[in-house]
Amino acid sequence: MIPLRDKVRVRRLPLVTVLLIIANIYVFLKEILLGPELKDVIFKFAVIPAAYLHPGAWTVSQAIANSISLVSSLFLHGGWFHLLGNMWYLWIFGDNVEDKLGHFRFLVFYILCGLVGNWAHIVTNIHSNSPALGASGCISGVLGAYLLLFPRAKIITLLPLFIFWTVAEIPAFFFLGFWFLIQFLNGFFTLPGSKESTGNVAWWAHIGGFTAGFLSAYFFRIRKR
């Protein structure tokens, strides 16, 4: 299922959503220009789970580096498909969530969901030396918030129908509930035994971010006077 747009109108310009999209695209273009140096930058600014949960992980210098990586990794992406997929979902769902939360609260919420997603990935891959990067935890948090705030909203969705494609209106609770189920099943079945169990997808970052977004959106939203 590919979301095309939703049918919820916004009352204010989604300024933070637009700026986040611009920032992510800008950082990715800078990645491309790094050439051979990109690998070193990725290992410095992405999240390496094994660097967080061992006795020497939180010396002063290492703690600073780890803390920076928890945030900087949220603005790095592994390829055009990774970047465009995340930004497309942010564009469709982020404006409505920002409208409900307000600009500053939305930015704090976005980063918080990304941090929770990173930690969910870390604790489920404690031996992994593979860098984890991307805004997926943040975007998942936005989806979780959207499910809580707009469960009955209609999502205009492109659906595969055998060898053809069709467009349908799908309720948000079904679209996002199905999306989360896919993430959870993939995360659950990649847990047992393997040190590098998640492959190229940080499923538990998605699960952690979505859960954080769903649980915290109620408290972040603007209260009506």
Image (spheres, grey):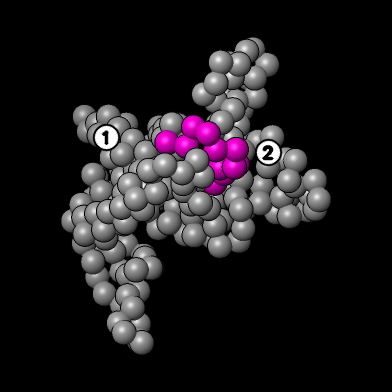
Query: Where residue 88 sits: x, y (%)?
Result: 47, 59
Q: Which residue is mark 1?
A: 215
Query: Where residue 130 sits: x, y (%)?
Result: 59, 42
Q: Residue 102: within the magenta?
A: no
Quick one: SS at disc 1?
helix
Instruction: Specify few, some or many for label 2: CA neighbours under 10 Å numbering under 14, 14-19, or 20 or more.
Output: some
Residue at image point 65% right, 19% down? 62
Camera sees residue 156 = yes
Q: Amino acid at mark 1?
A: Leu
Quick one: SS at disc 2?
helix
Q: Amino acid at mark 2?
A: Phe
Q: Which mark is residue 189?
A: none
Q: Main secondary structure of the magenta part?
A: loop
| Residue that extends furthest to the top in the rendered view of this protein | 60
Q: Which mark is residue 43?
A: 2
Camera sees residue 137 = no
- Work out whether residue 31 or residue 97 is closer to the camera in this orientation and state it: 31
Q: Which residues are magenta?
A: 124-134
